[in-house]
Image (cartoon, grey):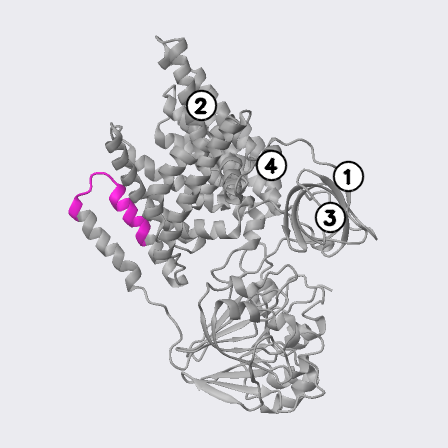
């Protein structure tokens, strides 16, 4: 490749990523024609750029159209799969599998031959190991995830990992093993580690640092790494692959000096051997996207360092970026890619044009300078990607980076090289374990004094902007010292001057969270915060509520409409992680904690907003759990919100005359079930908006067609968390504005609220 092609290649690939992301699937044929036309171009640079752009765009468009068809959702499919990973969690085993064969069972259905990768839940699974082949019957659904503000985007993660459907393994018929796992060097190495007399922590860290087996780390390991800002040290990165290549290069050049003392500097084979070592090590780690990215960056770095017809540092940076995205276009959505390339770009900026340090003191000063300049930029990048900040990171990384690079990784790799001499290998790994213990002690002490900080969402962008600009201010050459100091003071003032725009007196902010097939609403006034319902708890142990806020939140009141799991499943998570003023629930229900009873006509006022309970009555004997639901009316100015829980249509008629009209927003009863939102309620209230709190592709067909049409005839604007994600709206303002959604991603069908269109159920 000509060096001059590096930047055009990278720009073309980035353009292809943008085109593939924004273009509709119908453009595939047009792109195919463009590819043929570009091949006829006589200008090599333009041809290469056009071909790269079109190939990347086509790859992304094909990936977007490869998900499970809606027509196969919840249908039985017979699949033959290869097990890529198996994670055991109590009764549940989570599998990631590659699909070798797929066919629908029963009546003729759409083909499923295009499926390549699935994520499955297997309850009470037999012993399943990576590398094995199995035949099983599964029920799948297209990739989806909960869409809530400032939370982990599970759907985006599935997209990045190339997973085309999720689901579970049917117990009948039973899954059958087709073939045992073949030989794998990585699996052999992991088994070898398990057989050694090492402490569990040493085994976990050796597996993660040398074999890329991050799944061996426990949650407490990841919590400590996140809190100390050292997660980058425990995944296969350019640091690890680069260290392996540097070690092989150093040994090879030393050998070349002995063999050909007069020409060793010109020898090419040491550089080739270092490149082979980088490829081999990344392949041993599985050549997953992080390892592949590290390998490409290391190979380009070796070429730049060799000086043989090599690109300059910036051309090498662009070349590596273009190659990584060309090989794996989805990596553009991986935060790790941008964290890596931002860090390398700053290092180039810091070191370009400077003389190499001479002597230990100069190297130590250079290391400290690099770490201090990297710290704010990396903190900004992590803040934007993960909305967390590790204040201890600069201090810990000053010690952890040289310790890991100069001692831990070399000792770990030396232990593998000496595996055929067990006493020497054991000595290397014993020393490794002692150093790991010391490093963890340091990290724990630093985190105790400077714990992980999860800033409020309104602070994330201004704080990240301030940190990023501050790093550039001190890294750019030629700037005067007073200008850097004054600029830093101005940048520090940016996040301090930002204030949240919360509800004012008489205003109410309502957020209907996306918790799947369940219900959870957060209501906030100026100084009051409450929840209506807590969402479900799933059989896997996952509770959506636990993902919505960092621990330590204060909720003045929590109303649990009734004790069904889809409304009360998050109570335990609330008790464990948050501060609750009081719980309210219907008399006769059991929610796992003491509560005050909801009683008809109870009312309270907070910051000019009135909260009033319309149901249940004092005596609830004879009522079902659904019909005991706490019914809440909230009034802010001349606007009203009504939440009816799972109360049926007969109960609706009992409290209907007490509802003050007009109703601005109604949270439809029982997720849009046919048993609620009866004709009398809909016709009498004719709410401006109605919200269904349903799970996407739920097995109950919520919301029911009849209920949807009933609201549509009343002129109500319809919304559904299954398609629109979390919904946020304001009440009590002169201009309350429209409901805003979190579900605007392309994978969600634009919603029921767009143009107030009615949504039919999936049945």
In this rendering, would 127 be left or right of 326? right
Q: Secondary structure at mark 3?
A: loop
Q: Is residue 469 visible?
A: yes
Magenta stretch: dominant SS? Answer: helix
Is tag 1's residue or tag 3's residue first in the polypeptide sequence? Answer: 3
Using the rendered view, name the quadrant where residue 627 is placed.
Answer: bottom right
Front residue of 59 and 544: 544
Image disc number at residue 195:
4
Q: Which residue corresponds to mark 3?
A: 126
Give the spatial CA distance, label 4 vs label 1: 27 Å
- Compared to 143, does 198 lie above or below? above
Q: Secondary structure at mark 2?
A: helix
Q: Which residue corresponds to mark 1?
A: 178
Of the two numbered discs 2 and 4 in the rendering, the one whose residue sits closer to the viewer: 4
Give the spatial CA distance, label 2 vs label 4: 28 Å
In this rendering, would 467 be left or right of 729? left
User: Label 1 near label 2: C-beta < 8 Å?
Assistant: no
- Per the rendered image, the range of residues in magenta is 466-482
Q: Is residue 321 visible?
A: no
Q: Which residue corresponds to mark 2?
A: 248
Is tag 2's residue or tag 1's residue first in the polypeptide sequence? Answer: 1
- Compared to 555, does 357 lie above or below? above
User: Label 4 near label 3: C-beta < 8 Å?
Assistant: no
User: Label 4 near label 2: C-beta < 8 Å?
Assistant: no
Front residue of 118 and 222: 222
Tell me where residue 669 appears, x and y as whole percent: 64, 77
User: Label 3 near label 1: C-beta < 8 Å?
Assistant: no
Front residue of 647 and 206: 206
Q: Residue at x 40, y 56 (%)?
A: 452
Q: Residue at x 41, y 24 (%)?
A: 303
């Amino acid at each position: 490749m000509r060096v001059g092609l590096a930047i055009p290649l990278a720009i073309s690939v980035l353009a292809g990523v943008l085109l593939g992301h924004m273009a509709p699937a119908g453009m595939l044929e047009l792109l195919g024609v463009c590819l043929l036309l570009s091949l006829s171009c006589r200008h090599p640079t333009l041809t290469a750029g056009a071909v790269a752009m079109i190939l990347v765009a086509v790859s992304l468009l094909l990936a977007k159209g490869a998900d499970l068809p809606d027509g196969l959702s919840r249908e039985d499919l017979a699949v033959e799969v290869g097990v890529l990973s198996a994670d055991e969690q109590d009764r549940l085993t989570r599998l990631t599998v590659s699909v070798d064969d797929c066919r629908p069972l029963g009546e003729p259905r759409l083909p499923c031959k295009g499926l390549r990768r699935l994520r499955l839940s297997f309850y009470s699974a037999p012993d399943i190991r990576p590398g094995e082949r199995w035949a099983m019957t599964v029920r799948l659904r297209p990739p989806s995830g909960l869409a809530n503000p400032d939370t982990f985007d599970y759907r985006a993660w599935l997209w990045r990992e190339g997973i085309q459907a999720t689901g579970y393994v049917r117990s009948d018929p039973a899954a059958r093993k087709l073939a045992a796992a073949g030989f794998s060097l990585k699996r052999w190495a992991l088994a070898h580690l398990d057989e050694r007399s090492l402490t569990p922590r040493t085994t976990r860290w050796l597996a993660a640092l040398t074999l890329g087996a991050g799944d061996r780390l426990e949650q407490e390991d990841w919590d400590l790494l996140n809190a100390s800002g050292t997660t980058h040290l425990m995944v296969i990165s350019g640091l690890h692959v680069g260290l392996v290549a540097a070690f092989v290069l150093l040994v090879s050049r030393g050998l070349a000096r002995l063999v050909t003392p007069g020409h060793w500097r010109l020898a090419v084979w040491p550089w080739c051997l270092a490149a082979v070592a980088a490829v081999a090590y990344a392949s041993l780690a599985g050549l997953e996207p992080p390892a592949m990215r590290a390998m490409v960056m290391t190979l380009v770095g070796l070429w730049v360092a060799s000086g043989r017809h090599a690109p300059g540092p910036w051309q090498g940076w662009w070349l590596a970026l273009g190659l990584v995205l060309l090989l794996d276009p989805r990596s553009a959505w991986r935060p790790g890619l941008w964290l890596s390339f931002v860090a390398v770009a700053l290092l180039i900026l810091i070191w370009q044009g400077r003389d190499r340090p001479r002597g230990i003191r100069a190297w130590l000063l250079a290391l400290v300078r690099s770490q201090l300049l990297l710290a704010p930029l990396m903190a900004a990048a992590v803040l934007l990607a993960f909305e967390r900040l590790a204040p201890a990171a600069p201090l810990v990384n000053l010690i952890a980076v040289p310790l890991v690079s100069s001692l831990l990784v070399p000792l770990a790799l030396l232990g593998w090289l000496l595996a055929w001499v067990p006493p020497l290998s054991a000595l290397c790994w014993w020393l490794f374990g002692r150093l790991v213990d010391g490093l963890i002690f340091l990290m724990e002490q630093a985190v105790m004094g400077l714990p992980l900080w999860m800033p409020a969402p309104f602070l994330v962008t201004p704080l990240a902007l301030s940190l990023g600009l501050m790093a550039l201010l001190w890294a750019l050459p030629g700037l005067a010292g007073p200008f850097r100091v004054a600029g830093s003071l101005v940048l520090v003032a940016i996040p301090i001057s930002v204030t949240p725009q919360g509800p004012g007196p008489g205003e109410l902010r309502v957020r209907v969270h996306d918790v799947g097939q369940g219900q959870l609403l957060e209501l906030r006034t100026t100084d009051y915060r409450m929840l209506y319902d807590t969402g479900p708890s799933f059989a896997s142990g996952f509770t959506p509520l636990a993902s919505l806020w960092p621990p330590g939140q204060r909720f003045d009141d929590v109303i649990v409409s009734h004790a069904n799991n889809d409304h009360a499943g998050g109570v335990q998570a609330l008790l464990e992680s948050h501060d609750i003023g009081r719980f309210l629930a219907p008399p006769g229900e059991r929610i796992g904690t003491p509560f005050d009873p909801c009683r008809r006509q109870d009312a309270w006022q907070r910051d000019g907003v009135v909260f009033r309970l319309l149901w249940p009555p004092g005596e609830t004997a004879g009522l079902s759990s659904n019909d005991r639901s706490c019914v809440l009316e909230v009034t802010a100015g001349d606007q009203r919100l009504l939440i009816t829980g799972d109360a049926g249509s007969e109960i609706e008629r009992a409290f209907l005359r007490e509802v003050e009209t007009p109703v601005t927003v109604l949270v439809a009863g029982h997720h849009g079930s046919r048993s609620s939102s009866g004709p009398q309620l809909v016709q009498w209230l004719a709410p401006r908006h109605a919200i269904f709190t349903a799970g996407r592709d739920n097995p109950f067909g919520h919301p029911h067609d009849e209920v949807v049409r009933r609201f549509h005839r009343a002129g109500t604007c319809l919304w559904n968390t299954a398609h629109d994600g979390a919904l946020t709206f304001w009440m009590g303002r002169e201009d309350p504005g429209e409901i805003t959604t979190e579900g605007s991603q392309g994978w969600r069908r634009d919603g029921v609220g767009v143009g107030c269109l009615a949504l039919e159920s999936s049945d």
